[in-house]
């Protein structure tokens, strides 16, 4: 009984954490999911497969756009441009790469950072005149 209670607690904690950690912008019938994390959070095998450089000083930005209007939500191909700026106003132009796995489409960009650095992201996301929006968020990066 005790073991099953601990398992249930761990499962619930993971669910609450993932729900809280979700970063999403809803625009019209599109959901734009986004996250930024240190590249070392990606396993070496996955990094090698997708050409991601792992380093304590490189971050990774991931963007996914989903059209929620259809019966089954579908991933959308978009154009993303963006700038990452630190608190000292140093700017870094983000170069997003489109990645496809089956019907899934997502976009990845890497950027440099220093330990405990807070980065502001200013992105422009467009899709065939149906979607034209700005996405702004801040992420603090730590070296592991």
Image (spheres, rainbow, N blue to C red):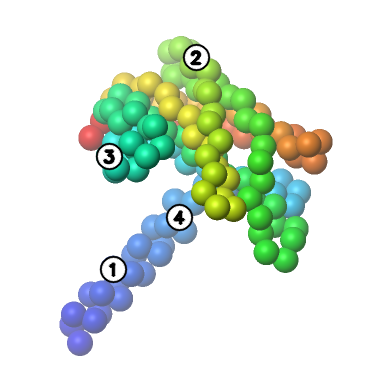
- CB atoms of marks 2 and 3 within 8 Å: no
Q: How many numbered marks does the figure carry?
A: 4
Neighbours of disc 1 within 10 Å: few (<14), some (14-19), many (20+): few
The residue where tag 4 is placed is 20
Neighbours of disc 2 within 10 Å: few (<14), some (14-19), many (20+): some
Neighbours of disc 4 within 10 Å: few (<14), some (14-19), many (20+): few
Placement of the N terminus among the 4 image quadrants:
bottom left
The residue where tag 2 is placed is 91
Query: Residue 5 versus residue 131: which sits nearer the camera?
Result: 131
Disc 2 on helix, strand or loop?
Answer: strand
Query: Residue 59 versus residue 127: which sits nearer the camera?
Result: 127
Left or right, 118 with respect to 144, comes to right
For discs 1 and 3, the disc positioned in front in the rendered view: 3
Disc 1 on helix, strand or loop?
Answer: helix
Which residue, as the protein is rendered here, is positioned at the far bottom? 1
> Hey, which quadrant is residue 74 in on the image?
bottom right
The residue where tag 1 is placed is 10
> Which residue is at a point 78% across and 36% down the rendered structure image?
128
State which tag comes first along the sequence, 1 or 3: 1
Neighbours of disc 3 within 10 Å: few (<14), some (14-19), many (20+): few
Give the CA separation, mark 4 to mark 2: 29 Å
Image coords of residue 106 (percent x, y): 55, 42
Image coords of residue 133 (percent x, y): 71, 35
State which tag comes first along the sequence, 2 or 1: 1
The residue where tag 3 is placed is 44
Give the CA separation, mark 2 to mark 3: 28 Å
For discs 4 and 3, the disc positioned in front in the rendered view: 3
- CB atoms of marks 4 and 3 within 8 Å: no
State which tag comes first along the sequence, 4 or 3: 4
- CB atoms of marks 2 and 1 within 8 Å: no
């Amino acid at each position: 009984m005790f073991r099953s209670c601990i398992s249930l607690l761990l499962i619930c904690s993971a669910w609450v954490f993932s729900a809280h950690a979700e970063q999403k912008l809803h625009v019209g019938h599109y959901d734009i999911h986004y996250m930024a994390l240190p590249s070392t959070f990606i396993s070496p095998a996955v990094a090698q497969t997708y050409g991601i450089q792992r380093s304590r000083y490189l971050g990774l930005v991931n963007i996914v756009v989903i059209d929620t209007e259809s019966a089954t939500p579908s991933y959308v191909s978009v154009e993303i441009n963006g700038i990452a700026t630190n608190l000292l106003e140093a700017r870094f132009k983000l170069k997003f790469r489109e990645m496809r796995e089956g019907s899934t489409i997502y976009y990845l960009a890497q950027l440099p950072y220093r330990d405990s650095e807070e980065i502001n992201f200013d992105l422009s996301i467009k899709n065939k005149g149906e979607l034209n929006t700005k996405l702004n968020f801040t992420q603090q990066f730590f070296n592991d």
